[in-house]
Image: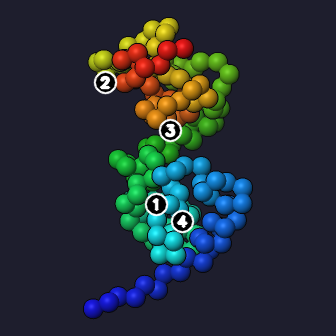
Amino acid sequence: MTETSTQSFAKSQALFERASKTVPMATQTFSKSALSFPMGAAPLFVERGDGAQVWDVDGNQYVDFVLGLLPVVLGYRDPEVDNAIRTQLDKGITLSLATELEAELAERLVRLIPCAELSRRHTLFRSSRSRPTTSDTPICGLTLAASSAHIGGHEE
């Protein structure tokens, strides 16, 4: 038996055409580009996410098997994560000097990743504007370069 889809992707298609005029592949991230999805048969833009679910700009609901860039473990809108973000937003983000939170995170990572080391040449944290590579992992505006720092992959 053949099942016919009643889903519409009209808004997604229109937004794709609009964004394509100013953004290469209509997205800032290759993994989210239209090249990864069948045109006209899959959404290209989502509007919101909650838990493991996403809703596209046309109002269709899906289980997010793509898993975005970070919600793999906790899903979208995890209350504990969202509250921590709101708390930090009230204090300011991307501040011009180091914060205690950076030291706490580094200490925790060193404790959890025994091979993580810090030195002047090979840093655990790197500003995302400082020659990021595909092996770097962005965390809250910083880029974790622990594995490549450990093997000497990032010489400044």
| Cα gap from disc 3 to disc 2, whole angstroms | 20 Å
Q: Residues within 10 Å of mark 4 (few under 14, many from 20)?
A: many
Q: Amino acid at mark 3?
A: Ala
As drawn, the residue found furthest toward the top would be 120
| Cα gap from disc 2 to disc 4, whole angstroms | 37 Å
Instruction: State if disc 4 and disc 2 touch (CB < 8 Å).
Output: no
Residue 148: horizontal and vertical position, in percent? Answer: 40, 23
Which residue is labeled 3 in the image?
84
Residue 60: horizontal and vertical position, in percent? Answer: 49, 74
Front residue of 80 and 134 = 134
Instruction: State if disc 1 and disc 3 touch (CB < 8 Å).
Output: no
Of the 4 image quadrants, the one containing the N terminus is: bottom left
Residue at left offset 50%, top offset 43%: 83
Q: Amino acid at mark 4?
A: Leu
Which residue is labeled 4 in the image?
44
User: Circle 2 sits in a helix, a strand or a loop, which is it?
Assistant: helix
Front disc: 2 or 1: 1
Front residue of 56 and 120 = 120
Instruction: State if disc 4 and disc 3 touch (CB < 8 Å).
Output: no
Q: Is residue 146 depicted above or below 1 in this figure?
A: above
| Cα gap from disc 2 to disc 1, whole angstroms | 34 Å
Which residue is labeled 1 in the image?
36
* Sequence-first tag of 3 and 1: 1
Q: Residues within 10 Å of mark 1 (few under 14, many from 20)?
A: few
Front disc: 2 or 4: 4
